[in-house]
Amino acid sequence: MSDISGLHFPDGLKYTRTHEWAKIEGDVAIVGITAYATHHLTDIVYLEPPIVGERAEQNKELQPEGAVESVKASTPIYSPFSGEILMINDGLVDSPEKLNEDPYTNWIYKVKIEDGSEIKNLLDLEPYRKHCESEEH
C-alpha cells in the first residue's frame, strides 16, 4: 500500500474515477492524467496519444489509440467527455517522462465537449481524493 498524502491534486479541475483530469475552457476540455496515476505507473516511457479528429466517448477508452506506458505497466487513457479530439500535446510524444515531472501542466489532449451535462459524471477535488484513498485500502 502506498501513501498518497504527498500527492498534489489541484482544485478547479474535474476528475474521473480512471484518474484523468479535465480543465474546462468553454466547450473544450484539456485532459491529462493525475498525479495518482503517475505515482502508480512510476517512470513513464511512452505515450500513445489519441488521434486528432477521432471521436471520444465519455468514460470509455480512447479508440483506436490512447495509452500511457511505464516501466511497470501500460494503461489506457479514458475520456472525461464525449466529443471530437481537437489536439494532442506533441511535446509529450517525444518526452513522455514530463508526465512524471508535472502531470497537471503537461496535458495530453483536448476534446470538444458535445454535451455539457456530462460534467455531472465527473468528480470534484474532495470526492476524487476520497476515491484515491479508497483504492489504496
Image (spheres, helix red, strand yellow):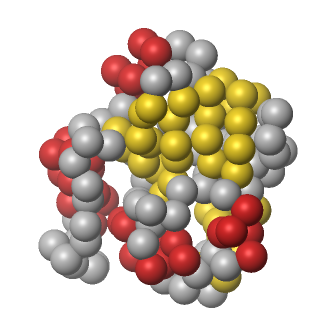
Q: Quick one: 3 or 38, which is closer to the camera?
A: 38
The answer to whether residue 67 is above or below residue 3 is above
Q: Is residue 117 above or below residue 33?
A: above
Residue 92 visible within the image: yes
Q: Which residue appears at 61% of the width and 41% of the height?
A: 110
Rendered-image quadrant of the N terminus: bottom left
**Total tally of numbered discs in the picture:** 0
The answer to which quarter of the image holds residue 2 is bottom left
The quadrant in which residue 112 appears is: top right
- Give whichever of 130, 94 is nearer the camera: 94
Closest to the observer: 72 or 14?
14
| Residue 101 x/y as whole percent | 45, 80
Q: Is residue 134 visible?
A: no
In this rendering, the answer to whether 88 lies above or below 12 is: below
Q: Position of residue 37 (x, y in %)?
A: 44, 65
The residue depicted at 42 percent of the width and 72 percent of the height is: 102
